[in-house]
Amino acid sequence: MIEDLKLVIDSNIPLRDAVFITLRDAIMKGILVPGQHLMELPLAHQLGVSRTPVREAIHMLELEGLVIMAPHKGARVAAISEKDLIDVLEVRTALEELAVRLACSRIEYKDLEKLEEINQKFIDACRSSRNDIIRIAQLDEEFHQLIYEVANNDKLLQLLNQMMSQMYRFRIEHIKLKERRQVLIGEHKVLIMALANRNEEAAIDAIRKHISNQEQYIMNEIQAHV
């Protein structure tokens, strides 16, 4: 029995997706830890479902890189490797640099207002005594998602959204330590100011430093647990 693992109930989505969301959130929150085996039958019993949606959900997690399948050993939660981190964040850097460059010329006052609103919610969540890591990560994701949308390039948005789940896992790791959240707040403010001034050079520099700091912090955490 895995403590705190309860099925996310939503009548509007297929059971397979509900199981997928439940397991993904458990991985993100650290309820399911790297290396932990995901056994279909025990999970099905605990979640109150049949094995089929569990099997399908595990396959979906494998496609997102959150689970790895080993011959004769089954599924287990994937660890974050140094190469995974570098590969994902190299691509993220290139795509987000383009996004902020485009956003500088296309952002409107209403977009800046909305960005400030999301960022204030992010700040409030970071400073809240609830320490709701998932909420903080979701707001950070919303902040960046709005910039992607302001860039107004459908193909770019599609590429960034395809990487969202892998970036989300790194985002979770990055905000677990409360001291890091204050740094993120400052980085967001610098980026907003650059966008408000339509300063492409400053915006690109801000997003590059933002992602580089995330990479360095998570890399240090990986190496500390080797």
Image (cartoon, rainbow, N blue to C red):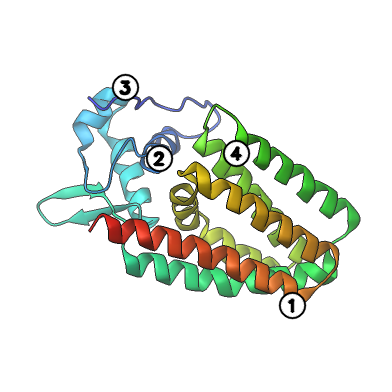
CA gap, disc 3 and disc 4: 34 Å
Q: Residue placed farthest to the bottom in the image?
A: 201
Residue 155 visible somewhere in the drawing: no
* Viewer-side label of 1, 3: 1
Task: Identify the secondary structure beneath mark 2.
Answer: helix
In the rendered structure, which amino acid carries the disc numbered 3? Gly
Q: Residue placed farthest to the right in the image?
A: 109
Q: Which residue is mark 1?
A: 201
Residue 206 visible somewhere in the drawing: yes
If you read the primary sequence from the N terminus, does the residue marked by circle 1 or circle 3 appear first? 3
In the rendered structure, which amino acid carries the disc numbered 2? Phe
Is 150 placed above or below 34 here? below
Q: Which residue is mark 3?
A: 48
If you read the primary sequence from the N terminus, does the residue marked by circle 4 or circle 2 appear first? 2
Locate residue 48 relative to residue 117 in the image: left or right.
Answer: left
The circle on residue 126 is 4
Q: Residue at x 85, y 67 (%)?
A: 197
If you read the primary sequence from the N terminus, does the residue marked by circle 2 or circle 1 appear first? 2
Q: Which residue is mark 2?
A: 20
Q: Residue at x 64, y 67 (%)?
A: 207
Task: Identify the secondary structure beneath mark 3.
Answer: loop
If you read the primary sequence from the N terminus, does the residue marked by circle 1 or circle 4 appear first? 4
- Marks 2 and 1 in Cβ contact (< 8 Å): no
In the rendered structure, which amino acid carries the disc numbered 4? Cys
Task: Identify the secondary structure beneath mark 1.
Answer: helix
On-image quarter of the C terminus? bottom left
- Asked whether 167 or 71 is in front, the reply is 167
If you read the primary sequence from the N terminus, does the residue marked by circle 3 or circle 4 appear first? 3
- Neighbourhood count class around disc 4 (C-alpha, 10 Å): few under 14, some 14–19, many 20 upward: many
CA gap, disc 4 and disc 2: 27 Å
